[in-house]
Amino acid sequence: MQSIREEEGTNHQQQTENFSGNIKYILAGIFFGIVFVKAEIVSWFRIQEMFRLASFHMYGVIGTAVVVATISTFLIKKFKIKTIQGEEVIFSERPLDKGNIIGGLLFGFGWALTGACPGPLYGLLGSGFAVFVVAILSAVAGTYAYGLLREKLPH
Amino acid sequence: MLDLLKQPWHWSVAGVLIGLTVPFLYLIGNKPFGISSSFRHVCAACLPNNANYFNYDWKRETWNLFFVFGIALGGAIGTFVLANPEAIKIDAGVQQQLAAQGVTDFTEIVPADVFSWKGLFTVRGFVMIVVGGFLVGFGTRYAGGCTSGHSITGISNLQLSSLIATVCFMTGGFIMTWLLLPFILKL
């Protein structure tokens, strides 16, 4: 089984893909965006209910997703299921460092403020809440600031 | 059938479908499911980058930008084609707490008094949209992933770092919600 550090990129496919190859990721995104909206995961109120321990909804969504993803990942490893291009699936190793804690807390603050993790930010934009383009650009600015400060931050 | 799709979906349905995104992306193109890396690709593609962090072949990662573009399209379909005929149902206790803290609009999926162009130009809206967005971008890349990359993909691949990051995401959210947000909402 091969694995690779997430840092080094998230495209683990050896074969290159052209524009039409990328269409399938748009379709996957569309499917995913519909789920986000229809299960109200994009709702600031649902996120508030989660953090105020007033509803099981978000815990149910994330918990079920983790269970299904874990079983699927286990099966892919166990039966060495190949990609549709016939390649061996490569899994990301995510390094353990202080960033998981400090960055994790900072993201948690942002999550409770915007009521959205990165996926829902895009979903909300599509839902017609145009002001979320400002939140997305702010997130890009935050990422840029992180990139510039990275060497100076504790890891 | 269409009526059923227009109702808000049960958490178990959403959870299964989101969970299946992980093997789906692995098998259609050897891609680990993750969303926050899209911010990094935008930086690498569009902004002047003398930092090592942005010095990589972002063109190999365009799949992720196609994916998030799809999420926005899916958001539009979910909202306008499969529109829920009824207003969002918010927990009564939470609505009461939020009303006491200064939220006035409970008719849409996000409080429209905060998340609108008018709201953006208030101190409260600026903190929640701009500062909040900045923290999402800074924090997810510092932590090495977001809810999708760490909490779902990372934990499903039994990564300890992902479990720790997820505990911290939740802790940060609790601190913000209980200790700071009551003051921010009154700004």
Image (cartoon, rainbow, N blue to C red):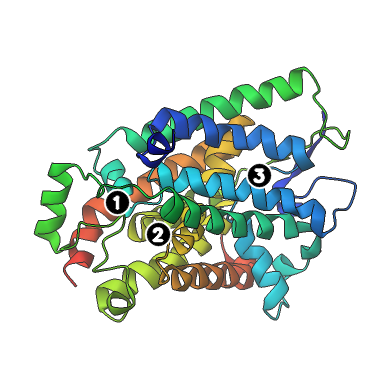
Mark linked to residue A95: 3
**Disc 3: CA contacts within 10 A as few (<14), some (14-19) or many (>=20):** some
Q: Position of residue B138 (x, y in %)?
A: 52, 63
What residue sits 52% from the left and 63% below the top?
B137
Label 3 sits on a secondary structure element that is loop
Q: Position of residue B52 (x, y in %)?
A: 74, 68
Of the pair B134 and A11, the residue shown nearer to us? A11
Contact between marks 1 and 3 (CB within 8 A): the answer is no
For the question of whether residue A117 can be seen, the reply is: no
Q: Nearer the viewer, mark 2 or mark 1?
A: 2
Would you name the residue on which mark 1 appears? B175
Mark 3 belongs to chain: A
Of the pair B143 and A60, the residue shown nearer to us? A60
Q: Position of residue A123 (x, y in %)?
A: 48, 56
**Disc 1: CA contacts within 10 A as few (<14), some (14-19) or many (>=20):** some
Specify the quadrant of the image occupied by residue B162.
top right
**Disc 2: CA contacts within 10 A as few (<14), some (14-19) or many (>=20):** many
Would you name the residue on which mark 2 appears? A110
